[in-house]
């Protein structure tokens, strides 16, 4: 689930559930739910674009915030993973699109999909994990001797495959 990482003295993580949120200058409450019609009245607002997956947009007044050091002259900006948002009152945060790996029933598709670890087809509805970095699906069914995801790191990109690892990225890396 996408989130905002907000610098307070330490970094705190605020999950973006789809509801619009306002970035405030209150250190005790750095974000709060925003009504749909509040753009421009509560400060910068981050909201999910309906019916387009997990795209998030920042709405702000002209010259009231910067994204990656650049002004947002038209007051609207589509956010990308690891974008830095700095508001006029000095609130600094990052947008992260990172998701945690989880076991879910495989959705299937028009063509057969093969696990990169065991090279067998992943059946629709079978337990699977999609790598949060590269998006490649792996089996994850310990009852059928196919714990392909947790066996080792992602067979496609090498991302850690610990299901309890949580979020991997932090703005401290910058």
Image (spheres, helix red, strand yellow):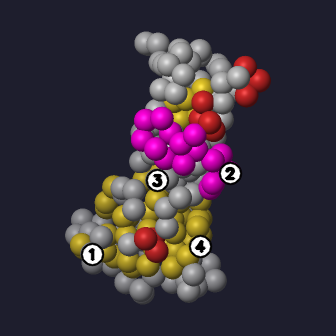
Q: Which residues are magenta?
A: 152-166
Mark nearer the viewer, 2 or 1: 2
Q: Nearer the viewer, residue 174 or 65?
A: 174
Quadrant of the frame with the C terminus: bottom left
Q: Earlier in the sequence, mark 4 or mark 3?
A: 4
Q: Which residue carries the number 3 mark?
A: 97
Residue neighbourhood size for the residue with mark 3, other residues' Cα within 10 Å, grouped as few (<14), some (14–19), many (≥20): some
Q: Nearer the viewer, residue 35 or 128?
A: 128
| Mark 2 Cα-neighbour bin, 10 Å: few <14, some 14–19, many ≥20 | few
How would you rate the neighbour count of disc 4 (Cα within 10 Å): few for under 14, some for 14-19, many for 20 or more?
some
Mark 4 or mark 2, whichever is nearer to me? 2
Residue that badge 4 annotates:
12
Q: Is residue 144 left or right of residue 9?
A: right
- State which tag comes first along the sequence, 4 or 2: 4
Residue at the disc numbered 2: 164
Residue occupying the point 63% across, 38% down: 150
Q: Earlier in the sequence, mark 1 or mark 3?
A: 1
**Magenta stretch: dominant secondary structure:** loop
Q: CA distance from mark 4 to mark 3?
A: 15 Å
Where residue 57 appears, x then y in whole percent?
39, 56
- Residue beneath disc 1: 69
Q: Residues within 10 Å of mark 1 (few under 14, many from 20)?
A: few
């Amino acid at each position: 689930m996408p989130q905002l990482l907000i610098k307070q003295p330490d970094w705190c993580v605020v999950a973006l559930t789809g509801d619009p949120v306002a970035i405030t200058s209150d250190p005790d409450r750095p974000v709060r739910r925003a009504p749909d019609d509040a753009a421009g009245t509560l400060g910068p607002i981050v909201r999910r674009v309906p019916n387009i997956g997990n795209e998030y947009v920042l709405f702000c007044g002209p010259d009231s915030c910067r994204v990656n050091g650049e002004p947002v002259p038209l007051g609207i900006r589509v956010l990308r993973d690891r974008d830095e948002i700095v508001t006029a009152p000095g609130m600094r945060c990052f947008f992260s699109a990172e998701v945690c790996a989880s076991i879910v029933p495989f959705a299937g598709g028009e063509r057969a999909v093969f696990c990169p670890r065991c090279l067998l087809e992943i059946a629709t509805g079978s337990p699977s994990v999609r790598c949060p970095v590269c998006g490649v699906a792996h089996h994850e069914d310990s009852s059928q001797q196919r714990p392909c995801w947790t066996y080792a790191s992602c067979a496609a990109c090498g991302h850690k495959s610990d299901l309890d690892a949580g979020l991997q990225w932090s703005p401290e890396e910058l």
